[in-house]
Image (tube, helix red, strand yellow):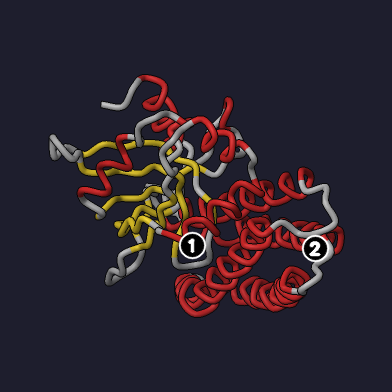
Amino acid sequence: MPNPFNQQIIDEFRANHGRVGGPFEGARLLLLTTTGARTGAAHTTPVAYYPDGAEQVLVIASAGGAPRHPDWYRNLVADPRVKVEDGVFVYDAEAVVLEGAERDRLFARAVEAEPGWAEYQAKTERVIPVVALRAVPKDGPPTMAVRSPGEAVQVVHDAFRRELAAIRTEFGRNQGTTLGAQLRVNCLTLCQGLTLHHTGEDTALFPFVAGRDPSLAPALERLRREHEEIAVLLDSLRRAVSAEDADPAAVRSEVERLTAELEAHLTYEEEVLIPALEPASA
């Protein structure tokens, strides 16, 4: 069983699809379930993570600079097949412990984003591990802990809202004249996620909704046009972020522009789609 503090976070995380309050409000958290190296029992731990493109997320086994690796890390070394809950999706993943130059590069990127990691490393003689969690491909739709398709739309939208809020907070901390490497990755990962999400809606969700309620055709056409407009904003953000001498102020401006347009789009989409996707009341 997790300790009472962790259990409270786990319960709140699951009840609110990844949103928690208190000292971790606004933080990027996931629930990592490993198999006990000695007991073989499942153990779930809240862990901070960093985005790293569409294929993986990164977690750091700091244990606050303790002399021993955390239990979850020792477990995944013994059995790298783990379960991840990110507030939207639940999926099996392969945990890959990064080594050598790759580990050092990504740890340095994390330190640039949050200097506390360096403080933890200074407190211990062990090399703090960096672990990549890579989703295991599966057939069929992704697993979501939701009760209805309408709730799924809301949960996904809220996750994008949280990520944009986290990025805007990070810009508030980025006071230098250069764009932080992890902040750059966060922006690009967000762009990837939104592009994939809108492609899935255009090709699968919208045709499904149109088949259920043909009267929604004009609203769905508006949503498709808004996807095209948001795609232009995503391209502008990608170009601003990817510039060799990326100007943090210019990138932040693109993020703010995207946030305003996306929020209006998400709100309208929720008004249109959620009632159409909820089960009819008896």
- The residues tagged by marks 2 and 1 sit, at their Cα atoms, a distance apart of 29 Å
* Spot occupied by residue 241 in the image (x, y as percentages of width and height): 74, 68
Q: Quadrant of residue 263?
A: bottom right
Q: Residue at x 86, y 58 (%)?
A: 249
State whether residue 90 is above or below residue 198. Answer: above
State whether residue 126 is above or below residue 6. Answer: below
Kind of residue sitting beneath label 2: Val
Q: Earlier in the sequence, mark 2 or mark 1?
A: 1
Kind of residue sitting beneath label 1: Ala
Name the outermost residue toward the left.
Answer: 39
Q: Residue at x 84, y 64 (%)?
A: 247
How many numbered discs, if any? 2
The image's mark for residue 237 is none
234 or 281: nearer the eye?
A: 234
Identify residue for label 2.
Answer: 251
Q: Residue at x 81, y 62 (%)?
A: 257
The image's mark for residue 101 is 1
Name the outermost residue toward the top.
Answer: 4
* Spot occupied by residue 105 in the image (x, y as percentages of width and height): 55, 59
Name the outermost residue toward the front.
Answer: 125
Within-10-Å neighbours for mark 2: few <14, some 14–19, many 20+: many
* Spot occupied by residue 80 in the image (x, y as percentages of width and height): 26, 54
Q: Quadrant of residue 255?
A: bottom right
State whether residue 195 is above or below residue 73. Answer: below
Q: Nearer the viewer, mark 2 or mark 1?
A: 1
Is residue 138 shown to the viewer in this render?
Answer: yes
Within-10-Å neighbours for mark 1: few <14, some 14–19, many 20+: few
- Quarter of the rendering occupied by the N terminus: top left
